[in-house]
Amino acid sequence: MTEKSIHQSKEEYVGDLSDGKRHGHGLCLYPDGGQYEGEWVDDKRHGMGTYLDPNGGSFEGEWKNGMRNGRGCIEWSGRYYGDWKDNLRHGQGTWTMPDGAVYEGEWRNNKREGKGTLVYPDGSVYEGEWRENRKHGQGTLTLKSGRKYSGSWENDARHGQGTVFFPDGAKYFGAFVQDQRHGHGVYTHPDGTKYIGQWEYDKFNGRGTYTYPSGASYTGFWKNGKRHGEGTLVYEEEDRYSVEEDIEAEEDIYELEESIYEGEEDRYEEKKDRYEGEWHEDMRHGKGTYLYANGDSYNGEWRNDKKEGYGTFTYVEGDSYIGEWRNDQKHGSGTYAAANGGKYTGEWHADLMHGRGTYVSQEGERYEGYFHEGKRHGAGTFTFSSGNIYSGNWLDGAMEGMGTLTCTDGTIYEGEWKNGFMHGTGKLSFTDGMVYDGEWDRDKKHGKGTCTYPDGGVYEGEWHENKQYGEGKYTYPDGSVYEGEWQDDKRHGYGRLIDADGDIYVGGWDNDKKNGKGILTFANGSVKKGRWINDKFSNEKKSKDKETRDRDFMEMFGNDLADAADQVE
């Protein structure tokens, strides 16, 4: 029977009634604007019916005891079609969300639970198990980019054992914890890259082996994706590696971050170089041994990937260095021993002998003193293999400045040096009593100087390339004195000779003999004036008075010899 009934709740009903209750088919308008049209049983929505929500939503489907039960479709904040139980989505159903995502699968108590497939708006797809609206259990997530994860899930995060497939062919298989690789896992890449070992929070942590594309490999400990702790790196040709693993977790349900590999190649190493030792943040740091392919080796301390601190470098040829290092170079105090017997002990700077040190050569030469950039520089003493000793200043590896050379035969030079030569002013003393004190040029007496000879003779004057040359005075052992011009250790030019017996010659000289015009005044007052040839007087002119003599001298020698004649008087 169709009747119109208005309930105390001010609901308006038009439809079938039974014993005063809505029963059968009817339409009910609710005070809030909602309405239901369909089947009723005992005053409750029961059977097939449609409910229109005042806010625009709707449900069309089966009802039981006033609640959605059975199959039905609701359109509100998306669209759901499927099974219901007591007003809750329960069973099999498909939900199309407002953003375009679609879930098809099992529900329980209004939540995704069981097996189901979720297609995201960007085309990514998850297919697998759910619990309380979250991916949980076994499932596969395939992203639009081609990345894919298949394995265990917990509370919407990868958790347990699983496999990640990357678009470039890379692959990870292993343990996950809260969406991050954590535990034991294996990463491989088509280029040959491979890591087998422990992970923590998506990075290498613990012990593991990393194989590089070239075939080089590192086995040891890791921390935060970097080599850290004890480990061994075996290099390949032209390879040197720094691994920066930063494979991030998914930012949200839609995305998995790619693996990021950062390598640095800061210098080439020969094939099969090998390092065994400590690491810190991907760099050799602490104590370690580096074995070079050519047979060289270093054993000692490292800092920031460079030799620094105390260490020993052994060369395949037999040379060795033991001492301090800085920035991959010998720096500080150390000893370099050469296979041939040479040895240096002292200070270093930037791989060069620098500062104070002692060097001994294979020939037995010895230097004690200061170095500058690999060369003797500053004050130092050098003992030659012959036994001669130089003590003094050095410049750029050569004797320069003030210094003293003492020879095994007793010869001593004290004075200035330049570029390894006696140069400047200095004094050379021989054991036989000969002494030269004066100017030098490249190991030769040159300039002004005084030489005292073993026989007591003394020369004071000018020198040229080790020979008396120019103006000079020679005092002979017998007291004779020559003062005048010299050439090649011989009296040559104009000069005056005063013999020990009082004879005086003033005039020309050639090849250490009187030659040319001259005057010889004897101690008794007699005079020879004229021309001389090889110490022999060729003609004689006697002057009876001073005036006549002066005139003759002026004619023969000019003013200088005329003045000299006055001195003879």
Image: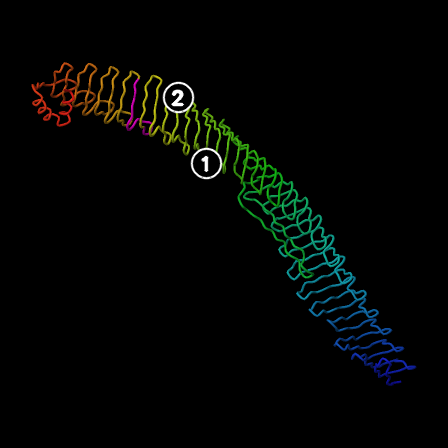
**Residue type pointed to by label 2:** Cys
Residue furthest to the right = 19
Q: Does the magenta run of residues contain 447?
A: yes
Q: In this view, does 550 lie above or below 310?
A: above
Q: What stretch is highlighted in magenta?
A: 440-453
Q: What element carries label 2?
A: loop
Q: Is residue 340 left or right of residue 167?
A: left
- Quarter of the figure with the C terminus: top left
Residue 407: image tag: 2
Q: Which of marks 1 and 2 is nearer the N terminus?
A: 1
Residue 95 screen position, x and y as percent: 74, 68
Q: Does the magenta stretch include residue 395?
A: no
Residue linked to disc 1: 373
* Residue 564, horizontal then vertical, whole percent: 15, 23
Task: Give the percent coordinates (x, y) of residue 18.
Answer: 91, 81
Q: In the rendered view, does 27 fall on the left or right side of 379? A: right
Q: Which of 153 and 168 is in front in this view?
A: 153
Q: Is residue 46 above or below residue 555?
A: below
- Viewer-nearest residue: 279 or 156: 279
Give the colour scheme shown: rainbow
